[in-house]
Amino acid sequence: MLLLTTAMEALVRVIETGSFSGAARQLHVGQPAISKSIAQLEERLGVRLLLRSTHGLTPTEAGQHFYEHARRSIEEADEADSAARGAGVTLSGRLRICAAVTFARLHIVPYLGQFLAEHPLLDVEVVLDDRNVDLIEAGIDVALRMGDLVDSGLTARKIAQGRRLVLGTPAYFERAGEPLTPADLVSHQAIVYDQRGGGAVWTFQQGTANTAVTLRGRLRITAAEGIREAVLAGLGLTVSSEWMFVPELRAGTVMTVLQDWTLPPIDLWAVFPTGRQASAKARAFVAFVESRMVAASRQQ
């Protein structure tokens, strides 16, 4: 039975990652072990589960059916194990999460020690990427994403909301002048976050008045870490979520302008793989992040 369970886990990971090597990395075993498990499973069942071609691996019809049942069985077994052991320290195994680099560096990674201490049998793998990775292909249990969710098929839950701000260093505003209205921004050097959720066009609101502005600047950057460094180097101002500059806002290293105007807020979402019920491990992590964001908002 143990060998069957191992083979089921191997097949699930192969189909989700699309390769033997991807499954091997996720399960921390050698690729030959994965190949052997799949071969033994196919021999046991008497059917071909995977089609191998120059384009990669795809499940057969039998393989797809087996995958669906195997995935549910593995998840239900994990849930049953957690329920039998009770709450709290009983979560075990691997939890693979994904988040944007800067957000995770500032708001997740420094506090993971507390989460790991609460769940000593749990291993956590953190995938950092400012882009929206394919959760199934990457084997992600839960991702933290910011902004609007363009894929309506995602299973997601909003866990926090933050402000967007116009900010820069005091030295930059002393040199370039402090904008008094959104229209003044067109004369400033803007550092544009060139990812979904960023961009150069922003709509400011004050009471019932709305003002749309297109930022101008010579610098566009695709990672929030680069935006931070450019701002701190005094290269210009930027529009950013307050989450990205929390330490500097507290220290006065950066300052906000146009505080009488508001920008659309930014949402933080917990996103789960489509068609899969969130595991107890994923739910525990989301609850942990949600509590962290509540605590952080009280400190601001």
Image (cartoon, rainbow, N blue to C red):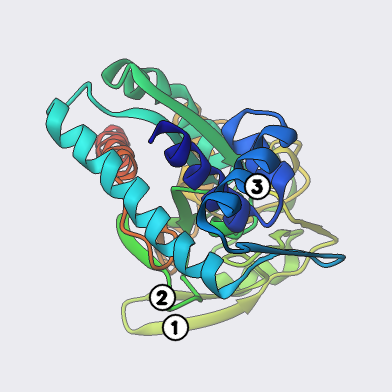
- Neighbor class of circle 2 (other Cα within 10 Å; few <14, some 14-19, many 20+) is some
What amino acid type is highlighted by mark number 1?
Answer: Asn
Callout 3, which amino acid?
A: Ala
Nearest to N terminus: mark 3 or mark 2: 3
Spatial CA distance of label 3 from label 2 is: 62 Å
Badge 1 marks a residue whose secondary structure is strand
Q: Kindly identify the residue that appears in the image at 53 percent across and 50 percent down.
A: 44
Q: Amino acid at mark 2?
A: Gln
CA separation in Å, label 2 and label 1: 5 Å
Residue 31 in which image quadrant: top right
Q: Residues within 10 Å of mark 1 (few under 14, many from 20)?
A: some
**CB under 8 Å between discs 1 and 3:** no
Q: Image quarter for residue 190?
A: bottom right
Is disc 2 placed on a helix, strand or loop? strand
Front position in the image: 19 or 294: 19
Q: Which mark is residue 205?
A: 2
Give the residue number, with chain letter if any, for mark 1: 210
> Which residue is label 3 attached to?
39
